Amino acid sequence: MKAKNLFCTGLITVIVLTFATQLRAQEQKPIREGTEWLDVFMPNNNDTALPRILLIGNSITRGYYPEVVKLLEGKAYVARLATSKSICDPALKKEINLVMSYAKFDIVQFNNGLHGFGYTEEEYKAAFPGFVKAIRKNAPGAKLMWATSTPLHTRADAKIFSSNIERIKERNKIALDYVTAQKDIRVDDLWALVVDHPEYYQGGDGAHPLAPGYTALAQKVADELTVLLNEK
């Protein structure tokens, strides 16, 4: 009878542990968008004369990237890692690890906040330190610059912000609180640059600026990166 009881107890324990493991796996399953994408561009791979910069971000980063490259010509080689992955998705760290393993980067500008709205701001806050840690791990000697997320507008009228605007504000605050406390991370406030300029978005999709907006963003990014390049 005692052996039978021990067997039943052990069986119940196995069932409970198996259920708990499956439950954790379900809880940890990434919340992804209907379409996920990754866009990487790494020029001048065999050149060593200039410092190397990596821009990590989303489609906004991808949009201002070409002009940043032109503005920094002769000063630095600029690569990009643009992705739809949220910082709450473990796949983002894998992408960072992969792309940053290809080269040594002297400066990294990074941004993330306009994707992954299936996650709460509490989850975003919990994931943010790991996002920064992944970058530091792959470029331990690099200078870092955080770029604030730009606002989203309605497609019909760029003077009206999208329903996610308060969430973007909160994510920017979470990120700014963290990077400011780090002391060694520069802030490039792209939000402040465009928030009062609906003309940069009018007639577009509400998320991506038109050419004048991208030009303004690229100039701001290039100016901030130039400051880092000139720092000893």
Image (tube, grey):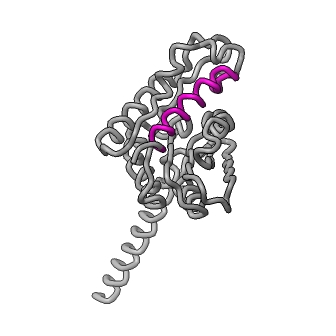
> As displayed, is residue 133 above or below residue 189?
below
Q: Does the magenta portion include 220?
A: yes
Residue that appears at 58% across and 28% down: 219
Question: Is residue 90 or residue 28 the one in the foreground?
Answer: 90
> As displayed, is residue 219 above or below residue 132?
above
Question: Is residue 162 or residue 102 the one in the foreground?
Answer: 102
Residue that appears at 67% across and 13% down: 202
> As displayed, is residue 193 above or below residue 135?
above
Q: How many marks?
A: 0
Image coordinates for residue 129, horizontal then vertical, percent: 38, 49
From the viewer's perspective, tell me whether residue 2 is left or right of residue 137: left
Image coordinates for residue 34, horizontal then vertical, percent: 67, 42
Q: Is residue 81 visible?
A: no
Residue that appears at 38% across and 42% down: 125
Q: Quadrant of residue 91?
A: bottom right
Image coordinates for residue 199, horizontal then vertical, percent: 63, 12
What residue range appears in magenta?
A: 207-229
For the N terminus, the image quarter is bottom left
Q: Is residue 213 visible?
A: yes
Image coordinates for residue 27, horizontal then vertical, percent: 47, 53
Question: Is residue 219 or residue 59 the one in the foreground?
Answer: 219
Residue that appears at 64% across and 11% down: 157
Dominant SS in magenta: helix
